[in-house]
Image (cartoon, coloured by chain):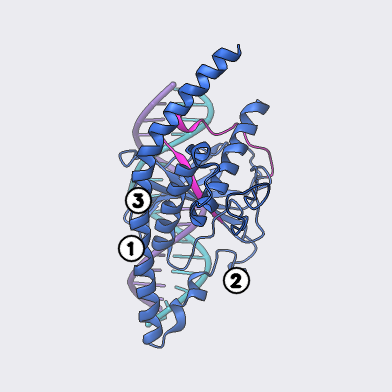
Chain colours: A blue, B cyan, C purple
Amino acid sequence: MITTIHEALKEELKRLYKENEELQSKIEEISSQCNMIESHLRERIMTSQDSGDGSTSLESIGKNVSDPSRGATNNVSRVFVRTTAEESSLVVKDGYAWRKYGQKVTKDNPWPRAYYRCAMAPACPVKKKVQRCAEDKSVLVATYEGAHTHPPQSLPKEPNSSTTTPITEYNCPGYMDPFRPSITLDLTLNGSPNPAIPARPIRTMVPDGDTSIGMAISAAMTNVTTAGTRNQELYKGLSNADPTFLSALSAAVAQNVASLQHRMNY
DNA sequence: CGGATTTGACCAGCGC
DNA sequence: GCGCTGGTCAAATCCG
């Protein structure tokens, strides 16, 4: 029994080492993309300030979807989902049943936007919009409006059995989906490698003023997060770990724990 | 055959 | 008032 477990763990460790190599190269690639996006963003901010137009300042870029001027339906959240670029469907598996009622091509994005209503309860007010990221067609952006008045139908499928993988999300401050597990890991506690690292919540803030840049940053950050998740054991104990990486890692680990809890409950 | 999806038409809000 | 755009409707079509 113990020997079997030992063998299984060894196999798992081997697999993790292999994945680690692949993911590290991915991180490097993403990191360079992040730098590019950041410099692009800074350039735009500088440009707008020089022209005396404050409309693209950091403050306005950070303006979020919970703007009260948008009315009572400010219960809005965004979920970014990685798909294969070839995958043409606009389906985001999230545990709820949705009925599509429209599709439209919008001005700022060449990809069509699909409109969904919750099909699980006639009175449920939740709506969902799904559209591909203009810059990266492999990323789906699902925008949820409202809160469900009923529990989910079923759990989302395992990442390796589905063509879509949730990668990160953006939520209005104060908004939490009551049916979604939420865990915050604090790496500053109990022998953390780096006491200077503050605990950070899972949910990642993404600037809403410039959607394309925000989504690109978000997608890049979550790729790093995903890498961290799969390699958490390998990085455990690192005394000089990069704070940014560990922060992302904490979020990723929390997501995995939530997923594991679900599987154990069913 | 019934439910889900597609798609063109329609409507409302907004800026000029 | 007009045109543009995003959101919704509903008839046609598809699919199991």
Residue at the spot 41% in from the left edge and 43% down from the top edge: A82
Q: Which residue is mark 2?
A: A69
Mark 3: few, some, or many residues within 10 Å (few <14, many ≥20)? few
The residues tagged by marks 1 and 2 sit, at their Cα atoms, a distance apart of 33 Å
**Identity, as a three-letter code, of the amino acid under mark 1:** Met
Residue at the spot 55% in from the left edge and 43% down from the top edge: A237
The residues tagged by marks 3 and 1 sit, at their Cα atoms, a distance apart of 13 Å
Tell me, for residue A228, which label it has, or none. Answer: none
Mark 1: few, some, or many residues within 10 Å (few <14, many ≥20)? few
Q: Is residue A253 above or below residue A136?
A: above
Labels 1 and 2 in the same subunit: yes
Q: Is residue A264 above or below residue A85?
A: above
Question: Magenta residues?
Answer: A149-170
Residue at the spot 33% in from the left edge and 48% down from the top edge: A137
Question: Does the rendering let one see residue A86?
Answer: yes
Residue A242 point in image, percent of width and height? 48, 54
**Identity, as a three-letter code, of the amino acid under mark 2:** Ser
Q: Secondary structure at mark 3?
A: helix
Q: Is residue C15 above or below residue A177?
A: above
**Identity, as a three-letter code, of the amino acid under mark 3:** Glu
